[in-house]
Image: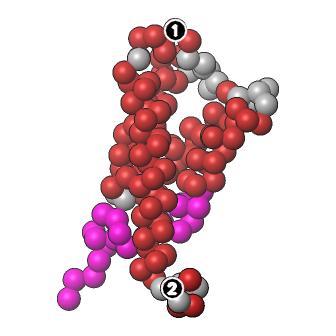
Amino acid sequence: MKKLIFSTKPFALDFALALLRIGSAAMMLTHGWAKIADFTNKLGTFRDPLGVGPAVSLQLAIFSEFFCAILLLLGFMTRICLLPLGFTMFVAAFMVHADDPFASKEKALLFLLIFVVLSITGPGRLSLDAQINRKRY
């Protein structure tokens, strides 16, 4: 029982990383899909924190929250796709919701924390990145 509770075997770590990566990507996909499905209505109310126009800001958010989330879900080009995801969550927390109470920023900050951790650790062995980089003998 002690081994089961205090195990730090590599498979447990890789499974935990896969769970974190897949779970956060799946949740992020729901945000991106909602923006795609309601694009025309969102366009009229979407904020422009970067000064590039609401249409471009919305398209960048969709790219990050939907398409990069799919790559994260698969564990393909993980560290590259985490850059736009992390940037989007940074903008959401510190620019879009800058004047809002902490409760409004909390979700973006949690996603940002997850994306920073995954950037540091990488996707783990249960990912397409690991399969591509696997040494062939």
Looking at this view, is 33 or 130 the one in front?
33
The circle drawn on residue 4 is 2
Position of residue 110 measured from the top left corner of the image (x, y, whole percent): 63, 48
Residue 131 relative to residue 39: left or right: left
Residue 112 relative to residue 14: left or right: right
Query: In the rendered image, which quarter contains the C terminus?
Result: bottom left
Q: Depth-wise, is mark 1 or mark 2 nearer the camera?
A: 2
Whether 6 is drawn above or below 81: the answer is below
Range of residues picked out in magenta: 116-137
- Label 1 crowd (10 A; few <14 / some 14-19 / many >=20): few
Position of residue 59 measured from the top left corner of the image (x, y, whole percent): 44, 25
Q: Is residue 120 magenta?
A: yes
**Label located before the other in sequence (1 or 2):** 2
Whether 103 is drawn above or below 79: the answer is above
Q: Is residue 18 visible?
A: yes
> Spatial distance from mark 1 to mark 2, Cα to Cα?
53 Å
Q: Is residue 64 visible?
A: no
Q: Residue at image x 60%, y 18%?
A: 47
Q: Amino acid at mark 1?
A: Gly
Q: Amino acid at mark 2?
A: Leu
Q: Is residue 51 magenta?
A: no
Q: Residue at image x 42%, y 80%?
A: 11
Position of residue 87 measured from the top left corner of the image (x, y, whole percent): 58, 42
